[in-house]
Structures are given as C-alpha cells and as structure tokens.
Image (spheres, helix red, strand yellow):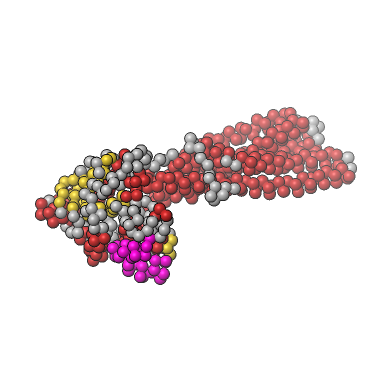
Amino acid sequence: MIDAYEDPGTPDRRGGARYLWWLVTRQPGRCAAGAMFGSVWMVLLAATPYLMSRAIDEGLGPGDMGAVAAWSGALLAVGVFNAWLGTMRHRTMTRVRLDANFRTVKVVVGQAVRLGSSLSRQMGAGEVVTIGVGDVQTISQSLTVVGPGVGAVVAYLVIAVMLVSISPAIAVVVLLGIPVIVLLVGPLLGRLQGSETEYRERQGVLTARIGDLAGGLRVLGGLGGKGLVADAFRRDSQRLREQGYRVGAVTSWVQALGIGLPTVFLVAVTWMAARLAARGDITVGQLVSVYGFVAMLVRPVSFWVECGYQISRGLVCARRVVGFLRLEPLADTGTRDAPSEPSALYDPGSGVRIRPGRLTALVAGHPADATAVLDRLARYAPSSATWGGTRLDEIALDQVRSRILLADHESDLFAGTLRDMIRPHGGAGNGAAGHDEAAGAAPHPAATRKALHTAAAEDIVQALPDGLNSRMTAQARNLSGGQRQRVRLARALLADPEVLLTVEPTSALDAHTEATVAARLRAAREGRTTVVTTTSPLVLDHTDTVHFLQDGKVAATGTHHELLDTTPGYRALVARDTEEAVR
C-alpha cells in the first residue's frame, strides 16, 4: 500500500477511464493477485455442483457409500480451501481499494498545493471538499472490478465449458442468455451516470453553501438574515434530495435487474434441463449439476452488474478528479529581476499608482473593483501592471511573492495554536520582523508582540486560557469575526513585507478599535508601502493618498480631506450615503 511519504506518481489526466486504469497500473502485482484469488475462488464455487453430481451418479445411484464418502471429502476440502481463498481475495482487494484511495488523496492534495492561491479563483471550496470526501471513496470502490469482476468472467467461461460436456444445447442458451441480461442493464448504467453527475454537481454547490453559512452565521444573526438563508438552504437541500431520489431510483432498478433477471434465467434453464432428464438425455446427477452451475452463475452476473454500477459511478467521480487535476496555476513566465529598491506600482487598467513608502487607500462604491486592483498589483490576476516600470508578469514570480503580500480579509486560518496561526510560513516578508522564514525559524517574541499590538489583538491573547499556545479551530471559529480579522492582520504585519496590500482590514471592527488599528498601522508601517481598501473615515484619515474609483477607474486622487472638499461622490460614499454614491 502507498506510503504516506511516497511519490504517488504522475496521474493520467486524459479522461476518467484512463485515470482509473492508471490507478490499476500503479499496483499491478496486487491487482493481478486480486484477479487470481477472485478467479480461483469463483471457479471453485462452480466445483461444488460438479462434485455433488459425481457423488450422486457414482455413489448414491449405484449405492456405493465409499464413493459417496470420497466425493463428500473432496467437497469438504474444496470448501475449506475456498474459504481461505475468499479471505485472501477480500484482503487483497481491500488493499487495492485503500491504495487507490490514498493515492488519489495525495494527487488531489498535491494539486491543491500546486495551484496555491489560484485554487480559490478556479474552483469553489464545496467542489474541492466533495472531491476529497465523496469522489475519492467512490473511485476506490470502482476498482473492485479487477478482482471479483475478472473472476466472474473466468468462472462464466469455465462453467460454459463444463455445460458443453453435459448438453451443448444448454451451453448455447447459457452462453447467449447471460450477455443478453448484461446488455439489458447497460442503458440503465448510462442513465445512472447522467443522474450521478448532476447529483455530484449540486452536492458541491450545497457543500460550499454550508461553509459560507457556517462562516457568516454570527453576522447573519446580527442582521436578522438567518431565516432567509435557512429558507434558501432548505430549498437547495430539497432539490438535492429529489435528485438523490432519482439516482436511487435508477440504482434500485440496476440492482433489482441484476438479481431478478438471472433468477428468471435460472428457472428457464432448470426447466429445460428437467425436460432433458425426463427424456433420459442427461442423468439425475447432471440435472443437479446444471441447476448448481446456473444457480452459481447468478453470482458472476450480479458481480458484473455491481461492477458496472461501481465503474459507472467511478467514471463520474474520476472525471471530476481529472478536471481538477487539469487546472493550472498562474503561469510564471517572468525572468527579470524585481526593482532593487522600493519602487512604484502602477495598474494601467484602473490608473492606480502606488508610490513607495506611503500609506495609500483605494475607495470604491463596489468593493470588488478595489479588490480587483489589488489582485492585479499582487499578480494574482493577468494584467499589464508594472513595478518600477517593469511589467509584473515579466518579473520572476518568487521575487514578487517574497516582497509583495496580499492580505485578504477572508484568508484561511489553519487549525493549531494561535502562535502557529499568526506565524507567516513563507511568501512575502524580508526578515525585518526579526525572523528568517527561509530557515523556518520562529518570529522573535518582540516582533510577535509588536504585530499583535499594531492589530489591537493583545486582548485576544489575554482572554485565551493558554495565551499564544491556546488551540484554535480551523478558520478560528472559536473567535468572533472581528477577532479573526485582527488575527489575520497581525499575521500579515508579522511577515513585514516590503509592499503590504490589505483588503478591508478593519471592516468587522467597532469604531474605537478601528481608529486604534488605523493609527498604529500608519506608525508601524512608516516608510514602507502599504495599501488598504476601505470606505471608513477612521482609516482614511490616517492615509497619505486616496484613490477614489468609479467603475473600476480612478475618478479622483488626493488626501482624504481634499477629496471630501472637492469630490461629492467620495464624500457621499464615506459618509455611508449609498444612494448618492451610486448616482
């Protein structure tokens, strides 16, 4: 089975079927063993009616009790050996499934790490969670076909050969009848794929909504919007349930036909064999063996239908995994060096120019416009933005990331201690905060205290039972929205990047705390380039330059007080007069 630290290999991303085949080829010996155990186990199941027919014809018929005892002993030995084979088959196939499961998890996690910051811009969190939780399990289950599936084919051929020696007519009926049964189930499997695909898509959307709801529950409660969101979630979950019923309806028919049709076929063949026995064309022992063979064929056919069902679902999930693996991070085509000294950032798309060493604010009636500017200035979106006169996409990406940090107010907070949560791990930061991220050293305690003080987050540490060593849940759910925002700001400040771009860093804070953070942020970042997106007068009053954006373009530039005096739209916006701001 794959080791936790072993390279999972390079997955085949050309399609769902090719990905499933890649999982098989990564463990050929184990899959071959599973096929061998499954084949011998199922063939020996067919040996039971054969041995019984010999005991009847050679023992019970002539009255030879010695022959009866001999054939009964052989039947016991085969049964014991087959029980061991069944155990080995199950163990081997469990390892096959677990290997496929862990291998898929590793390639999915590796792809998520490879995509980095571009992941959230290309795929929703709910879709990723659905792949990691549901699809991985379904894919591993579909590999059952390499064991019992192969064994069912071998057993079918062996039984057909044995039936030829009894009655060619019965053998022909069996050889033609079983494929017809499988073909009858085929259209249902195609329908199942379509229903399963739609169900998985809706499941991903609903999973994402659950995450959004959990993250904003406190805010929704304060705004009185929990009822509206709950009603919307209830409608979506009901639609998902209805789609699940449709998937279940098709599945029930597949499974019912997988058992029912072979049973009907068993009745027909038994009737045919009974008539042959009545005419004396076959012996009573042969009649018993025919019944046993055909009854045993119910198991291989059921395996085929089950494998078809599992493969159908596995293909749907494998296509989703392959679609995820095909995503590409933002291309790094830059080869030039970054400016050797602090330089201006310029975004031609909006006209925003960020002068080095100053605290600059972007104010927009639509916050997404300001956020889009920061995405371009941080090179998280394709653009013609420049840094010191050089296009950002021409500068080596690692140099951009090491000196420019985009701090999103919704950036992820990973579970662990608060100390680990605010500790920057790579990315922007030049070590000025008293740590060496390249060497993986922890930030200096003084730098940590300074960052927490600037973000007005000292009270958070003091309120926790173990201070910075207190355990935090994923996304710091055990903190309030304002506390999480200050923790994120402290983490960004602790990285101490040359250029800090922050999205609404104080939007969830009360007025007093917001004013405190604004004043401390200006002092802590004195002489370094800092950009904030905000419409808060308390923050804007501490900035050096303000760019007022309308429709994503710079409409006015100046200090906060200059724009209040000269730009009515700006004055209305920061005064929270939204109707006039829109006009």
Is 91 left or right of 461, judged from the image as shown? Answer: right
Give me the residue at 34% from left, 46% from top: 399
Query: Is residue 316 visible in this depiction of the protein?
Result: no
Query: For this rendering, which residue is in front, 358 or 42?
Result: 358
Q: Is residue 289 above or below residue 572?
A: above
Query: For this rendering, which residue is in front, 525 or 326?
Result: 525
Q: Residue 321 location, x and y as percent?
A: 47, 42
Q: Residue 34 location, x and y as percent?
A: 65, 43
Q: Residue 170 location, x and y as percent?
A: 72, 31
Is 446 colored magenta in this rendering? yes
Query: For this rendering, which residue is in front, 398 or 382?
Result: 398
Query: In the rendered picture of this protein, how many numbered marks are placed on residues?
Result: 0
Give me the residue at 53% from left, 45% from top: 7
Q: Is residue 34 above or below residue 444?
A: above
In this view, the residue farthest toward the front is 340
Give me the residue at 53% from left, 50% from top: 5
Is 378 colored magenta in this rendering? no
Q: Residue 97 location, x and y as percent?
A: 58, 46
Q: Main secondary structure of the magenta part?
A: helix
Query: Is residue 183 visible in this depiction of the protein?
Result: yes
Q: Is residue 454 above or below residue 534?
A: below
Query: For this rendering, which residue is in front, 373 or 198?
Result: 373
In this view, the residue farthest toward the left is 565
- Quarter of the view holding residue 60: top right
* Range of residues picked out in magenta: 443-470
Give me the residue at 36% from left, 46% from top: 398
Is 30 left or right of 491, judged from the image as shown? Answer: right
